[in-house]
Structures are given as C-alpha cells and as structure tokens.
Image (cartoon, rainbow, N blue to C red):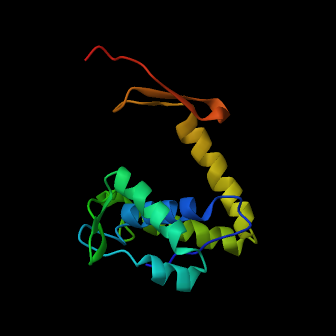
Amino acid sequence: MEYRIDRRSGVPAFQQIVQQTKQALRLGVLVPGDRLPTAKEVAETSTVNPNTTLKAYRELEREGLVEPRPGQGTFVRRTLGRPETGTDSPLYAELVAWMSKAAGAGLEQEDVTALVASAMEKQYAAGTTAATGSTTSGSTGATTTRSTGE
C-alpha cells in the first residue's frame, strides 16, 4: 500500500492516511493479516514525518481496524469491505463504465467529483438508515439517533 498525500487539500496528512487505509479496507485491497507499511517506509515514499503515520495508525487502532505487534509492524485486524464493494463486483464495473463515459463526454476529474458528491448527497444525506436508526439532516451532515423501540 502506498499513500498519496495531497498537501493542497486542506486535510491533515494523518487524516489522509486514515481515509486511504479505510478505502483500501472497503475495497478489499487490505485484508485481515496484511501488514501496513512502516512509518519509515511511509515517510520515504510520501515525505511525511514518521510521527504523522504513527498518529494515523493509532487512530486506526482506536477504531479496532489495525493492531500493532511489537517488533513486527502494524497489521490489519478487520476489514470494512462487503462483497458489493470489491473491485470485482458488478457495481464497480458499472462505475468504471460510467467514468469512461464521463471522460468521453469531456468531463474533467473535478466535474466528475462534483457530480458524484451531489448524487451521494441526494441519495444518502436526506434519508434514514434503517440499520442504525440514524437520520442525516440536509447538507450539514448532522446525524441524530432516534430510538426505534427495539
């Protein structure tokens, strides 16, 4: 796994490492038992301070996603992936086809990002998640939990 740090994004480097690790866990790129790169390796490839990586790994550990093994490294403890989110899923193939169509229509990466963000907000922000009983309100992204009586 190689981390890509975008210094212009405004997102702290440690948070980018957390986000990219979670994305890899969702996509099945990382699976339980995999070893994450050492802080030194990340520093060499991404030019971030090793302490930045260690901070990210502590956050992932706090969330129960990874575990440090003294003298061995940091290892994936559990995945976030589902069969529907893997790169071999039909949904992924449809998304790749759509991206190709968008590029063919002349859309830039920023245009696609804006379209996807808008569609995601429309699909997920106004709804209720049945499994958690959470409701997300509008564009604020604020989440409230209500009792379902169960």
**Relative image position of residue 21 (x, y in whole percent):** 44, 65
Q: Quadrant of residue 13?
A: bottom right
Total marks in image: 0
Q: Looking at the picture, how far across and down is residue 20, in whole percent?
A: 49, 65
Of all residues, the one furthest to the top in this rendering is: 149
Measuring 66% from the left and 47% from the top, which residue is drawn there?
Answer: 118
Asked if 29 appears above or below 133 in the picture, the reply is below
Quarter where residue 16 is shown: bottom right
Say which of 121 and 43 sits in front: 43
Relative to 5, say whether 43 is above or below.
below
From this viewpoint, is residue 23 visible? Answer: no
Residue at x 61% of width, y 47% of height: 119
Residue drawn at point x = 60 percent, y = 35 percent: 141
Q: Is residue 45 visible?
A: yes
77 to the left or right of 115: left
* In-image side of 95 versus 68 (left or right): right
Residue 2 position, x and y percent, is 48, 79
